[in-house]
Image: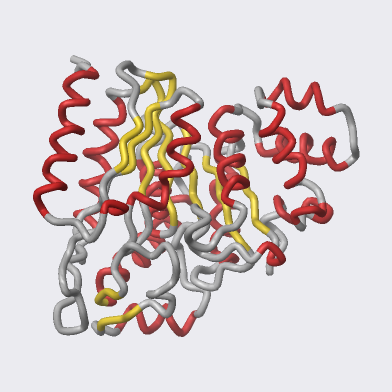
Amino acid sequence: MRVSIQKTIDILEKINQSESGVGLRNEACRSKFFIYPHTTSKVCLFLHGFTAGPYQFEPLGKALFSQGYNVLVPLQPGHGLAGDWNRQNPPPLPTDIKTYQEFVLEWLQIAKTLGEQVVVGGLSTGGTLAAWLGLEYPQQVERALLFTPYLANRNFLFTILIKILPIYFEWFNKDASGNFGYKGFRIPALRIFLELGERLFQQAQTHTSAPILMVCSESDRAVSLSKQQDYFTMILKQQPKSWYYCFDESLEIEHRMMTKMEDNDYEELVITLAKVFVESDLTWQQFQEMAMRIIQGKSYYPIQQKLKLDPQAFQQLSAMMTRRFGCDDLKCINPNLKV
């Protein structure tokens, strides 16, 4: 029997109340819910990055809510808690991936009560979890948005250290603007996501994923761009409705790409990509053909109609397919181009 939307809204309200009682680092870490008093055609479930919080998906969440979708951005286990966290007293982040997997499966069930189709998405380790949902439960996930997912480290030496060291680590940019999460963590809490990424590669060889949007950046110094490209190529073999986009290095979009208050002065480009992918049914081949038509200066109107885009969103997408944003000869959507 389908749970009533009012019961789900009551559950979300209780979660808000419980977060008020546990003591969060700040309001930015509170779960974000953008909900209509009725079910919508799609509901979006977004997963924030490691040591961060739901604030990372507030701009995109609001944009998709304004498009008529319900949006959930829950605070993940062990994250966002107030405390004097340091090397001697590290934040209470889970060290068993099952904790996160059970968490996202619970939220997947909640999401299903709020919309006809579920779109999942995540940044970094949240993107790894979204990839797992899309690969493990493709019948329940309509789309998966992977924003620079953590599948491997950019620096191979760091990968080796993560696999063997139990030490406490502080982020190099811990005092950067927009960092409302933890400044450090114990390595084993991150290791479980590295291991999950390795399992995803094995599983993708034989399983068909829900359609994915892979969004990367050449300026991302945290994760492996080549591994992201390899994963997309593997998924594409069995899921032709998947898309890929990589921001040019000249834009200086770093790992935290979801908001202007973090590392991305081009926040609206990420939002445009997400909106286009969520609302379109184009295959990868059709998407590339559309991009080529834009570059060749062919009539915009038929393409705009096919993508069901408003003029502003289509103008932004068109600009992204040109040299204005470093997309030279479709380099931005060519995952076979190793950087």
Foreground residue among 40 and 116:
40
- Could you say where residue 303 lies in the image, as x and y percent from the top left? 77, 26
Vertically, is 188 above or below 306?
A: below
Q: Residue placed farthest to the left in the image? A: 21
Q: What residue is shown at x 48% (from left), y 61% (from top)? A: 262
Residue 124 visible somewhere in the drawing: yes
- Could you say where residue 335 lies in the image, as x and y percent from the top left? 67, 56
By what rule are the colours in the image chosen? Answer: secondary structure
- Could you say where residue 38 lies in the image, as x and y percent from the top left? 32, 16
Picture quadrant where residue 339 is located: bottom right
In the displayed structure image, the side of residue 319 where residue 127 appears, left or right: left
In the displayed structure image, the side of residue 110 where residue 235 appears, left or right: right
Q: Considering the image in quadrants, where does the N terminus appear? A: top left
Picture quadrant where residue 44 is located: top left
Residue 139 visible somewhere in the drawing: no
Q: What residue is shown at x 33% (from left), y 78% (from top)? A: 163
In the displayed structure image, the side of residue 285 where residue 83 appears, left or right: left
Foreground residue among 255 and 208:
255
Foreground residue among 118 and 320:
320
Q: How many marks?
A: 0
Q: What residue is shown at x 57% (from left), y 50% (from top)? A: 267
- Could you say where residue 3 lies in the image, as x and y percent from the top left? 19, 19
